[in-house]
Amino acid sequence: MAVDMEAVKELRSMSGAGVLDCKKALAESSGDVQKAADLLREKGLAKAAKKTERTASQGMIFSYIHTNGKIGTLVELNCETDFVARTDEFQALGHEIAMHVAASAPLFLVPEDVPADVIEKEKEIFKAQALEEGKPAHIIEKIAEGRAKKYYEENCLLEQPYIRDQDKKIRDLVMEGIAKLGENLVIRRFSRFSIGE
């Protein structure tokens, strides 16, 4: 199938992928630009998953101060090279994550960071709530597990829904950055400051 060069240009501007990758994706999707963009995205995320094992020892610290001056954040975002750390895409990602931390106030980076005693205490509370709601005893444990997962989504940065797109988690945002920039990206740590807290 002959690939329309206008479609290749459009797909390149949408995805940032190379000409050959765009041609292959358009050929696979019978010239449908949107399907081709989805194919490129899937392939990019698959490649990104492989890159997460590489060492990310460069990067930057990003800050965000809310307009009222009462909330501020610091986020350390790492990448593999200093070159990538200076790109506009990396800068934009770091700023978005710092702003998200200000808005969503996560307590932990990943679920593994939640102390075992904290999650066990939360599960006990969830079980007691489920019993009080009159739930059958044989499903209390499943209910507690489901609510623990919700606790992680509310309190762990990488599990939180992204403030600009609730269908996407911060983890997905980072994976998209890896796919786009071609390097492993890692949120190493963060801090959030709020007046009166």
Image (tube, grey):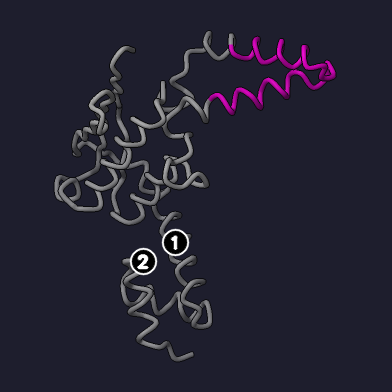
The residue that label 2 is drawn on is: 15
Residue type (three-letter) at the residue carrying disc 1 = Arg
Residue 144 in percent (x, y) is at 68, 20
Disc 2 is placed on an element classified as helix
Find the magenta span and give its range: 122-151
Residue 32 left/right relative to 179: right
Q: Is mark 2 in CB contact (under 8 Å) with mark 1?
A: yes
Figure quadrant of the C terminus? top left
The disc placed on residue 41 is 1
Residue 193 in percent (x, y) is at 28, 20
Residue 38 in percent (x, y) is at 49, 65
Q: Which residue is drawn at 51% across and 77% down?
A: 28
Q: Residue 129: say if magenta.
A: yes
Quarter of the image for residue 22 reads bottom left
Up-down relation of residue 171 to residue 179 (above or below): above
Up-down relation of residue 49 to residue 102 (above or below): below
Q: Residue at x 48, y 67 (%)?
A: 39
Q: How crowded is mark 1: few (under 14 residues within 10 Å), some or many (20 or more)?
A: some
Up-down relation of residue 184 to residue 33 (above or below): above
Q: Residue at x 32, y 76 (%)?
A: 19
